Amino acid sequence: MRKLLLSALVMAALGSMQAHATVTDSMIEQDGKTVGDVLTNGLGTQGQRFSPSTKINTTTVKNLVPAWSFSFGGEKQRGQESQPLVHDGKMFVTASYSRIYALDAKSGKKLWKYEHRLPEGIMPCCDVVNRGAALYDNLVIFSTLDAQIVALDQATGKVVWKEKIDDYAAGYSNTAAPLIAKGLVLTGVSGGEFGVIGRVEARDAKTGKMVWSRPTVEGHMGYLNGKENGISGTTNATWPGEMWKSGGAATWLGGTYDASTGLAYFGAGNPGPWNSHLRKGDNLFSCSTIAIDVATGKIVWHYQTTPHDGWDFDGVNEFVTFDLNGKRMGGKADRNGFFYVIDAKNGKLQNAFPFVKKITWATGIDLKSGRPNYVPENRPGDPTASSDGKKGATVFSAPSFLGGKNQMPMAYSPKTGLFYVPANEWGMDIWNEPVTYKKGAAYLGAGFTIKTINDDYIGAMRAVDPKTGKIVWEVKNGAPLWGGVLTTAGDLVFWGTPEGFLKAADAKTGKVVWEFQTGSGVVAPPISWEENGTQYVAVVSGWGGAVPLWGGDVASKVNYLEQGGSVWVFKLAGK
């Protein structure tokens, strides 16, 4: 009896130590397998957004009720795209206009708030959003709209270190959640519509000191510990003249990391400008997944989904690693409408197939070369070929530039072997115009109008089989889907809608088994964790993002939706 009592006391002490432990690399690498916290954006650095918890499942989900809700307050609403983090009984959640809150995870009580002082003249492309933070040691780290990165003490919210990423007056900003890998905090840059130069930076997570920097536009020099570390690619190999000097390829969505490969995977966005007739060639490394050795800052491989992009299809979507037939693969649902399965170690294409119903710019992907089979007449026309030289021929393209999938992260379940993709069916009228680069000015050279395709729906939550390329099931939605996905070992898929609902469906069949109205549109990804034997689900609610700003006819269709700013947390009734 005495031994059992001593054993229980030791276990309790260890549990207490673990609960109050600082966040370590090993804890971060195990985040996808543990249930007691959420330490990373993506519920694990691989980005699978899978919770191993089973208490909330297809049988019990009918009893899911609100536990608490917290309002971000004030007049600063707009888009809320943040994924919360949970550690040591605290929830850390960012909000629009570069704010971050620490909340008691059980009650929702505000513990502290940090509001970054933003200068006049910031130029965020697609709303004043922030997609979340990172945890390391005793710090919570997040990026800001004026292109800074800030590390705060988790307990007090006091600034520990702060670093400038780049010049906001030149169009740089930052909206993505940082990525932690091997003691480094990895960040990208936003601002592709302003002719910035995309790159990935790695800093010492405890101090903020720069370790390496890797540009994502060919011709620019990388650095390691303050010394030159090789040019990205080969100058002028895929860019004409001086165009690479304002080449875009912003890494605005952040990255994933796989400890088994030692590689960080970042997507690089659209080349600048949109008018593709000004920049002949593939324009590397725009519209690519780039695998970077975390130890050296060197590019190990790249895969370009839309060479010589002419539609702003970007390429920034998350690369989610998973096991398939005994090999480590990565899945990517690209804005261009195709889903790619790529070897995570060497970048070789394994499979590619559409995950949306209508694609006009290409007939498919050549699995041998990895390149798209273009439809040449669907490229927007060259303005210099027009009679007045001011506007090229207009074409109708699908998907629209807002993509078959945009910022909203998908989820993967190792239990079902399926990806759960928030897809959108829409197109656009698009045309090219003359443009020249000017620091801090929009650098598009194109005009566009987003169009609906179907009368009954725009968004569709789709379960996709990466082996066969088949859509196993779908749940249609009248408005575009713009929020991310969570899947669980309880055979559930959670996602939100602009109409304000958080929904849950059976992961195997797609049958919607629960929903809750949050009061504003959901454009953020849900999370789940357990504390003292109780499983919680949480999501941030607050309509905004790119759709109401850029959505054309689609924006008009959903202009009745109201803004908001709150966190909702749910648990099973009686728990």
Image: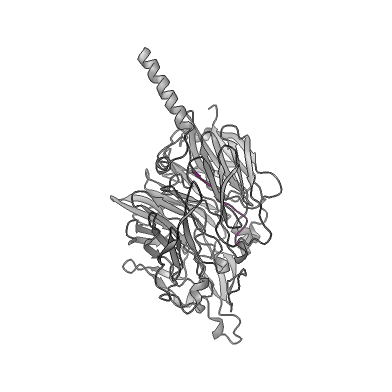
- Residue 512, given in percent of the width and then of the height, sits at 50, 43
- Residue 281, given in percent of the width and then of the height, sits at 43, 76
Camera-side residue of 46 and 412: 46
Task: Tell me if I can see residue 103 in this picture.
Answer: yes
Left or right: 54 in relation to 516: left
Q: Is residue 63 above or below residue 439?
A: above
- To which quarter of the image does residue 557 belong? bottom right
Camera-side residue of 432 and 422: 432
Boundaries of the magenta span: 125-135
- Residue 273, given in percent of the width and then of the height, sits at 54, 72
Applied colour scheme? one colour
Q: Is residue 384 above or below residue 298?
A: below
Task: Tell me if I can see residue 334 in this picture.
Answer: no
Q: Is residue 509 above or below residue 266?
A: above
Residue 128 lies in magenta, yes or no? yes
Left or right: 154 in relation to 411: right
Q: Is residue 407 above or below residue 100?
A: below
Quadrant of the rendering where the N terminus is positioned: top left
Q: What residue is shown at x 40% (from left), y 16% (from top)?
A: 5
What is the residue that sits farthest to the bottom in this orientation? 387
- To which quarter of the image does residue 284 belong? bottom left
